[in-house]
Structures are given as structure tokens and as C-alpha cells.
């Protein structure tokens, strides 16, 4: 198996550009030859040879939502060389300056990286007091979750401290740099700027006036955290491999939308108005939205994709459905998909379908939730419906 195929099979990388650098790292490591670097970047003086994989001591108590994830299967590097750590981490995130704060000190840097749809989940430690300065993060945001130790960081013109149980959200072209203690370790979620901008357009119908700059600290007692936690739980399920492969396209679409919508509506940022405007319910909007969803019952579909597909802001669609149907568009779609599953289970001809396969076909990736919604809608279990197959 090639190094690229191995990386893809482990879920370390996807086919989008930010993950391509990781493929180059893996290929270079396999060949034991220097990694090609862009013009003007630092050149390694010797091949990259990773150290044997050693587990990090992540405390599940800090973020229990991530318990059980095998981060080591996504080990990108382990090195005691500061130049290598700087170069290899910069290939995945941004070129940056890494400086040891203890005179004559040494580090033991390790990084794990897992792709989850268009998002990514990384774990990183330096095992030394360090200063890291990437400047402005161009093209992406980072949601940082410390698991051990403490970090002091500067974002824009504000300084913050974060410890386990506290989140930090950075990006939006604001200058970012930090210092970390010797035992500092963090889990990092990378979110692409293009996805954030697209979600904002879907919500409001207008382009961002300028860079979307979020308030950096996300206290766990704020309204934002309870809404973010379910999205991180979905991400952890995918990273643990808890779900059937057939469910992943639906999960990835739901995960990204849930995380981005939560941040844009709950976390203070530079574009957030006192209230997002929404038009009154109008039958043309309902007709277009319903027709679009009915034609795509078997496809991954989010509110953002629906808004983009029919050219109507998400808030307008939500207002129209709430006024006319007494429910949101995604809840309406779930009901239509439940009916589609029931019809498929009852239809004659051919071998009897498996309930799980049919549920996954129509986007119900969480089979426990599917069974509960199905019983509530039809007052019987899916298996009971299948037993009455004509």
C-alpha cells in the first residue's frame, strides 16, 4: 500500500488542499528523503525519521466528549528537533516561528491528525516551554481545547489564558501567538474560513462585510458551549469509528453545519447584528424548499445547502416553515424521510430490505434516534412494519 493510500485509509487526510501537506509528510517519511519545501521556506538538513509512537497523556476528564478516540493512529510526527517540529506542524497548519523559552532546553514534540469530513481534529504537545507565533491565520479558524497545562495567548489586541475545560477560538485574519508551559497539550479543531463565510451567507443572504472575527474565549458556562458540545460529540463519534461508513456523508454534512451555525449565532463576532432579519413566511419559499428536499431524500442535506440550492437565506426558510408548518425545515425533512423509510419497508418485490440499511439510505445515521422517531411517528417499530411487508 502506498503512503498516500495508507494515510487516506486511516482517515488522516482528505482530498482537500489543507490535508495534502500531510500526504507529502507521510510519503517523505516512507522514502526517508527530505520533504520538498516551497520556495523561501526553511529547508531541513536531514531526512525526517519519526520516533517510535508513544502515547500522550490526555486527560479524558478535561473533555470527556473525546474519550475513546485512538489519536495515535493519526500520528504525523514525533521528534526532539525543534526545526523539524516547526516545519512539519507548519505543513499542516501555517508556517510559524517556534522558540524554546528555557535556555539550553529541549523538546519532545508530537502531533496526531485525523480528518473528519471537511473538518480536522489534531492533538499536539511540545513537552517544553515554548513560544509559537504563526501571525494571522489566513484561510482557517482553530478551536483549541487544552487537555493539560496552561496556555497564554494573544488574539488581535486581547490577551487570554486557557486551561483544561476552557476553549479558545482563533482566526479571522487577526494576529495570533501564544506561549505554553512544559506540560501543555491541546486538541485542535480546524475549520475552513470558506465554510464559515458560506454558512454566514446561507444564514443572512449577504456576504460578510469584512473578515468574521469571533470573540476568542468560549467559557463553558456561556450559551455557546452547550450548543457546541453536541457538534463535538458528533465529531468524536466519527473519529472513533462508531458509525457505519454509509452514515458518514450525512454525519459530516450535519456536523459542519451544526458547528458553524452555533458559532455564528451564539458566539459574539464582528458581523453579528442584534437580530438576524427573516422574511415573513411566503408560499413561494415553501414550495421551492419542499420540492428541493423531496428530490433529495437520499442525499446529505443541511439547512445551509438548502438555502444555497434555492437561493433563499436560511433565516427566511426557517421563518416560512415555522409560520406555515409549526416546525423547522430540517424537522419537516425528517418526517418526509421517515415516511420514505416506511414506504420502502412495506413495498413488495425482491428480497426484504434490512431496516438499518434502509434507515442509512435516507440519512438516519444514528439508528437509536431513528427507531425512537419512527415509533413516535407510526406507533410501531420498524421491524413490526417490515413484518407486514406485502
Image (cartoon, grey):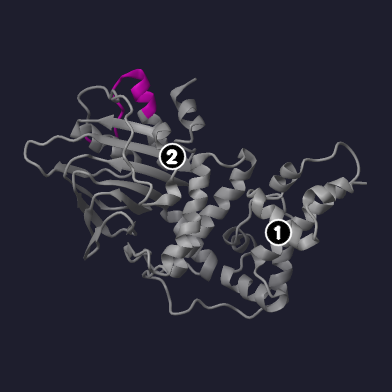
Which stretch did the figure color magenta?
A: 26-42
At 30% from the left and 20% from the top, the residue drawn is 33
State yes or no: residue 35 in magenta. Answer: yes
Q: Which residue is mark 1?
A: 373
Q: Position of residue 295 (x, y in %)?
A: 74, 55
Q: Which residue is mark 2?
A: 114
Question: Where is 160 relative to 324, above or below?
Answer: above
Left or right placement of residue 295 versus residue 129 in this view? right
10 Å crowding of disc 1: few (<14), some (14-19), many (20+) = some
Q: In terms of depth relative to the viewer, which is nearer, 17 or 80?
A: 80
Secondary element type, mark 1? helix
Q: In terms of depth relative to the viewer, which is nearer, 15 or 29?
A: 29
State yes or no: residue 256 in magenta. Answer: no
At 45% from the left and 55% from the top, the residue drawn is 194
At 21% from the left and 30% from the top, the residue drawn is 80
Q: Position of residue 79 (x, y in %)?
A: 25, 30
Q: Return the residue found at the far left.
A: 103
Secondary element type, mark 2? strand
Q: Return the residue found at the far right.
A: 390
Q: Position of residue 384 (x, y in %)?
A: 83, 50
Left or right placement of residue 38 versus residue 99 in this view? right
Q: Position of residue 209 (x, y in %)?
A: 40, 69
Q: In terms of depth relative to the viewer, which is nearer, 64 or 219?
A: 64
Q: For the stretch drawn in magenta, what is the main secondary structure?
A: loop
Are the residues tagged 2 and 1 within 8 Å (C-beta)?
Answer: no
Q: Nearer the viewer, mark 2 or mark 1?
A: 1
Q: Which of pointers 2 and 1 lies earlier in the amino acid sequence?
A: 2
Whether residue 256 is visible to the viewer of this picture, yes or no, is yes
10 Å crowding of disc 2: few (<14), some (14-19), many (20+) = many
Q: In terms of depth relative to the viewer, which is nearer, 197 or 325?
A: 325
Amino acid at each position: 500500500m502506498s503512503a498516500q493510500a495508507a494515510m487516506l485509509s486511516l482517515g488522516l487526510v482528505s482530498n482537500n488542499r489543507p490535508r495534502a501537506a500531510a500526504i507529502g509528510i507521510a510519503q517523505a517519511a516512507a522514502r526517508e528523503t527530505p520533504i520538498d519545501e516551497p520556495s523561501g521556506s526553511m529547508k531541513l538538513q536531514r531526512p525526517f525519521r519519526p520516533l517510535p509512537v508513544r502515547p500522550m497523556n490526555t486527560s479524558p476528564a478535561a473533555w470527556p466528549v473525546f474519550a475513546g478516540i485512538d489519536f495515535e493512529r493519526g500520528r504525523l510526527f514525533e521528534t526532539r528537533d525543534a526545526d523539524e517540529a516547526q516545519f512539519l506542524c507548519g505543513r499542516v497548519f501555517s508556517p510559524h516561528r517556534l522558540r524554546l523559552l528555557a535556555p539550553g532546553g529541549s523538546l519532545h514534540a508530537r502531533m496526531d491528525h485525523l480528518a473528519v469530513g471537511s473538518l480536522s481534529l489534531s492533538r499536539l504537545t511540545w513537552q517544553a516551554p515554548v513560544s509559537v507565533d504563526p501571525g494571522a491565520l489566513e484561510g482557517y479558524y482553530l478551536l483549541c481545547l487544552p487537555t493539560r497545562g496552561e496556555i497564554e495567548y494573544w488574539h488581535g489586541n486581547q490577551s487570554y489564558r486557557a486551561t483544561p475545560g476552557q476553549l479558545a477560538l482563533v482566526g479571522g485574519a487577526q494576529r495570533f501567538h501564544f506561549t505554553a508551559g512544559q506540560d501543555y497539550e491541546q486538541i485542535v479543531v480546524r475549520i475552513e474560513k470558506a465554510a464559515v463565510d458560506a454558512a454566514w451567507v446561507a444564514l443572512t443572504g449577504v456576504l460578510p462585510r469584512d473578515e468574521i472575527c469571533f470573540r476568542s474565549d468560549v467559557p463553558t458556562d456561556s450559551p455557546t458551549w452547550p450548543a457546541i458540545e453536541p457538534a463535538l460529540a458528533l465529531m468524536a463519534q466519527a473519529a472513533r469509528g462508531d458509525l457505519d461508513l454509509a452514515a458518514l456523508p450525512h454525519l459530516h454534512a450535519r456536523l459542519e453545519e451544526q458547528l458553524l451555525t452555533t458559532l455564528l449565532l451564539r458566539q459574539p463576532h464582528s458581523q453579528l447584528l442584534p437580530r438576524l432579519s427573516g422574511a415573513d413566511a411566503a408560499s413561494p419559499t415553501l414550495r421551492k424548499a419542499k420540492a428541493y428536499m423531496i428530490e433529495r431524500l437520499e442525499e446529505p442535506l443541511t439547512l445551509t445547502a438548502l438555502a444555497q440550492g434555492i437561493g433563499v437565506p436560511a433565516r427566511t426558510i426557517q421563518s416560512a416553515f415555522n409560520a406555515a408548518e409549526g416546525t423547522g425545515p430540517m424537522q419537516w425533512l425528517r418526517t418526509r424521510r421517515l415516511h420514505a423509510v416506511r414506504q420502502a419497508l412495506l413495498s413488495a418485490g425482491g428480497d426484504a430490505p434490512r431496516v438499518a440499511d434502509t434507515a442509512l439510505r435516507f440519512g438516519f445515521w444514528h439508528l437509536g434516534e431513528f427507531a425512537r422517531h419512527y415509533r413516535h411517528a407510526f406507533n410501531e417499530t420498524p421491524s413490526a412494519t417490515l413484518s407486514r411487508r406485502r
